[in-house]
């Protein structure tokens, strides 16, 4: 998938320029991809950093009652308008993954989801990329985001998704 700002795209879409808060990709899918790979063709200019947050580290900083709410309280993760899907309803934290995406769903979050998001933001690390850099992250553990882009940026990344390997029996 080619990721670069495009005229007419919503500011917070992959083609937009708004700050993207820490999130897991395709949180609205029943089985989001396990891995995300990104390749930098052009990093853009200025402070157009990617960010990454270790959700396990964030979860370890939260009180037990918040963790229980993240496991028990289902929320709806709507699919984007251009995707033919009703989205997914489930917990932010389950036995296999962390699932979070603040875009368009914050109105139905519990307070515990907001506490978790704030901790992810607090521990965010910047990724400054150069042309030719490639990074690969575990979408079930790490959240990624980006700072606001200049609307006239020449930033261009390529993204690929990978599923969990399965053994045939």
Image (cartoon, rainbow, N blue to C red):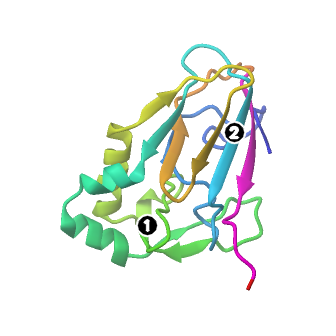
In the shown orientation, is residue 27 left or right of residue 10?
left
Span shown in magenta: 155-168
Verify whether residue 162 appears in magenta: yes
Residue underneath mark 2: 38
SS of the residue at dot 2?
strand
In the shown orientation, is residue 10 left or right of residue 103?
right
Residue underneath mark 1: 92
Q: Residue at x 48, y 28 (%)?
A: 126
Q: Are marks 1 and 2 in contact (CB under 8 Å)?
A: no
Circle 1 Cα neighbour tier, 10 Å, few/some/many (<14 / 14–19 / ≥20) = many
Q: Quadrant of the N terminus?
A: top right
Q: Residue furthest bottom?
A: 169
Q: Quadrant of residue 68?
A: bottom left
Q: Residue at x 55, y 54 (%)?
A: 24
SS of the residue at dot 1?
loop
Label 1 and label 2: CA atoms lie apart by 24 Å
Q: Position of residue 27 (x, y in %)?
A: 58, 62
């Amino acid at each position: 998938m080619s990721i670069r700002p495009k005229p007419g795209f919503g500011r917070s879409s992959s083609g937009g320029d708004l700050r993207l808060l820490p999130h897991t990709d395709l949180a609205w899918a029943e089985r989001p991809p396990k891995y995300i790979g990104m390749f930098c063709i052009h990093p853009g200019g200025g402070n157009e950093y990617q960010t990454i947050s270790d959700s396990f580290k964030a979860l370890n900083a939260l009180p037990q009652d918040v963790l229980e709410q993240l496991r028990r309280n289902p929320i709806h993760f709507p699919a984007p308008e251009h995707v033919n899907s009703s989205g997914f309803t489930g917990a932010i934290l389950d036995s296999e993954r962390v699932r979070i995406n603040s875009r368009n769903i914050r109105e139905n979050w519990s307070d515990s989801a907001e506490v978790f998001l704030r901790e992810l933001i607090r521990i965010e690390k910047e990724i400054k990329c150069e042309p030719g850099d490639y990074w690969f992250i575990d979408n079930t553990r790490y959240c990624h985001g980006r700072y606001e882009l200049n609307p006239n940026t020449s930033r261009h990344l390529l993204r690929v998704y990978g599923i969990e390997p399965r053994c045939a029996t």
